[in-house]
Amino acid sequence: MNNESKLMRWFNKRYDLSPFEHFAKEKKVPDFKGSFWYYFGGVSLFLFIVQVVTGILLLMYYQPGAQTAYESVRFIVTKVEFGWLIRSIHSWSANLMILSVFIHMFSVYFTKAFRTPRELTWYSGFLLMSLTLVFGFSGYLLPWNTLSYFATKVGTEIVGVVPVVGIPLMEILRNGSDVTTATLTRFFGLHVAVLPAVFTVVLGIHLLFIQVQGISEPESWKDIPESKKNHIPFFPNFVLRDVLLWLIVLNVLAILAVYFPWELGHKADPFASAPAGIKPEWYFLFMFESLKFLPSKFLGLDGEVVGVMFFGLAGLLWFLIPLWDSRTPKGSRNKIINYVGIAVVLYIIILTTIGAR
Amino acid sequence: MDQKILFGLPLLFILAFASGTQAQKSQTVDKCYSCHRDIGSDEAQAYKNDIHFKAGVTCADCHGGDPTVEDQDAAMSPAKGYIGVPKASAIPQVCGKCHGPSKTELKEKFRLDDVMDDFKASVHGRALSESNDGPQCVSCHGIHNIVSIKDRRSPVYPTNVTKTCAKCHSNPNYMKKFNPGLPVDQYEKYLTSVHGKRNQSGDPKAATCVSCHSNHLIRAVKDPRSPVYPTNIPLTCSKCHSNKMYMAEYHIPTNQYDNYVQSVHGIALLKNSDLSAPACNSCHGNHGAVPPGAASVASVCGTCHQANADLFDKSVHKNAFAKAKLPGCVVCHSNHLVKPPSDKMIGFGSASVCGECHKDNSSDSAASTILVMKTTLDSLTNGQKDASALLAHAEQLGMDVSDASYSLRSVNQSLVESRVQVHAFAIAPVVSAAQPGLKIVADAQKSALGAINEYYFRRKGLGVATLVITLLVVLLYLKIKQIERKSRQ
């Protein structure tokens, strides 16, 4: 403690850290029955940090290119000391991060934390979720194995069905008309440079909004006196609880990485036919499966076009929820929001389950 | 088919003879014949002995015209269908009037086969359709003096037919017009063959050209329907060579085909349709077919198994076998019943061939060589199996051992080379060929064991890491509880 004080004194002599000290001491977090869900924001942040660290380590050996990508990943998992662990953790934490981001988003949705004055936090969070999905999609291709190659081909083809802008957009994504080594280079650039930079900025803004506005209180606290509201200090109580959960997640990651090492599969062969039953990653599965259920023609348009446009519109409505939630300005209860949310969750779970079979 | 014709023909000629009197009567009113006979024409003289003359076929039946009138102009009038000497390309049509598909009185009477369809589908029929110089009926059967094919004078009688075929097939200038790549030495080779020698000595049972190639329906050798297409050759040869009655007078075995179909060569050719596998002619020759002598067996096998033959030629067995008049490769591998070679053939086990001449004791100086060769091959084979099993186990544990698995495939090369070197019948070449394989096996086993150890190391490492993290979680949990207790107080 003495050392810490000395250290703080050393810093305080040079920089005035008292505002930060004050902020840490004064910041409180609501503590109630459902406050467990608050921790998924922190878990997502932790998994992002794991991604950054393991991603940098993988970058030391990874070589983009159709002739080198697969070979370099094989080298990482077979020759580099603990390379198998780093790669496996990177892949597993990517998936857990997406799951955690989804849970975080739905917990925010159901606790109505997107309402005034936190609309911008919701928008930035939605953007972060979208970036996370793009992270997943672009990273999936990088090992250049059969599954990733054909999943990318199918995934980018779906983009191509969007009217008017679809084909140009697909060609921009693919860096050409087909999935080639040029696509791999483009995805690599996106995955290791563009996305991390954009994500870090948006994440910074998102965290800044949270720190400035504080963590949202539950709706049920609106009508109870301040004295009955239970808070815990952000530091050290909330932070230590966060760290506790992070350690548990780290343990889960280690177990998954060792017991279920992420398979590398076979090298992609662009001239081979696509393997039977090719599927995208689980987080795109509900959309992919929905397209399969659509008739080939719907309202005079191709079923696939209708599907893609429907998901585009649904995503936009989800993004703009603070605008169309009519009771937001009043801050009152809105059961329709809950019903819509439950329907969306059930839809995603059911379609993902069907698609995974 | 050929044999049916062979046995059917006597009946045909008996019928022809029986009706001869009537037929000769009809010729007496044939003004063409009587006039040409009277002026001493060679054709008419020859035709007197022709089988067709005896059957009542008149000149006009082939040449057209009116055989009932004396006047030459009227008899040979194109208006009466006179065609003169038919063009070569038209001859099959002329003969086909009776020997073709259409029903005629003569065809019915003598029960003649339709051979025209076969001829048209044959290489000869095709050659004729492309050139007027191509072969047709009279090229083989003659003109005006055609006799029964059972008649020793017939150009297609077994002892004459090879010479008949050779008229064209031994003439390079003629053959160039149709197939410049086709050899023209078949007849010369045939004369050197066992078949040819017997044929020349007057044995009509010895195989001739038509025995293998058929007569009217001769197809190109590369045509899968040809009886001499590689996959059909064994059966074609077996028609005679597996016929005990037919071969009885020659005192040679008739089990070659039965053995061949069970052999490694027969399975490769007949079951797996591997056209590079040898058929009968690959070892015995085709037109010059002879059984290879004891001294030349290794050379015959060496045309395909070159490395083995070279090693054998330099080995101690070469002279030893020659002295004992043993037929080289056949001593260990058999001839028609060549079984897939196995490492069990080496050594002194029940399936070994070494043990048939050598003894497994110190009195036989070759015993130690045999045992070292056997041990070396077994080490390589067993080592490969063990390494494969270890790698499979490592893979089953989820470890990536693809590099070692890939390398292990090269052991097959070393194994093949070592097995080939066995034909040197010495230790050094076998051991030397096995060395690279043994090293690969050792490396693969090391990699597999390393991967298996790594697997258990990872699990132990995970156990330690989980324990440490869990301990931290517990400590942190207690600390949080402590802090929260303090803050409540």
Image: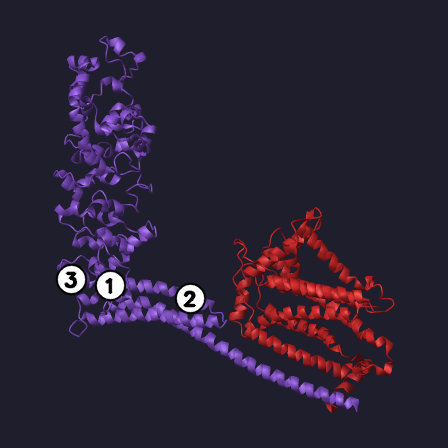
- The chain holding disc 1 is B
Q: Looking at the image, can residue A338 be seen?
A: yes
* Side of B195 where A35 appears, left or right: right
Q: What is the x, y in percent for residue B170? A: 23, 34
State the residue position of label 1: B424
Please say if the residues under marks 1 and 3 sit with CB atoms less than 8 Å apart.
no
State the residue position of label 2: B407
State the separation of the CA atoms marked 2 and 3.
40 Å
Name the residue located 47 percent from the left edge and 67 percent from the top edge.
Answer: B402
Is the C terminus of chain B in the top left, top right, bottom left or bottom right quadrant? Answer: bottom right
Q: Amino acid at mark 2?
A: Ser
State the separation of the CA atoms marked 1 and 2.
28 Å
Query: Which of the pair A354/B465 is nearer the observer?
Result: A354
Q: Going from the N terminus, do you reach mark 1 or mark 2 first?
A: 2
**Among the chains, which one is red?**
A
State the residue position of label 3: B320
* Side of B97 where A256 appears, left or right: right
- Element under label 2? helix
Q: Amino acid at mark 1?
A: Ala
Q: Looking at the image, can residue B177 be seen?
A: no
Label 1 neighbourhood size at 10 Å, few (<14), some (14-19), many (20+)?
Answer: many
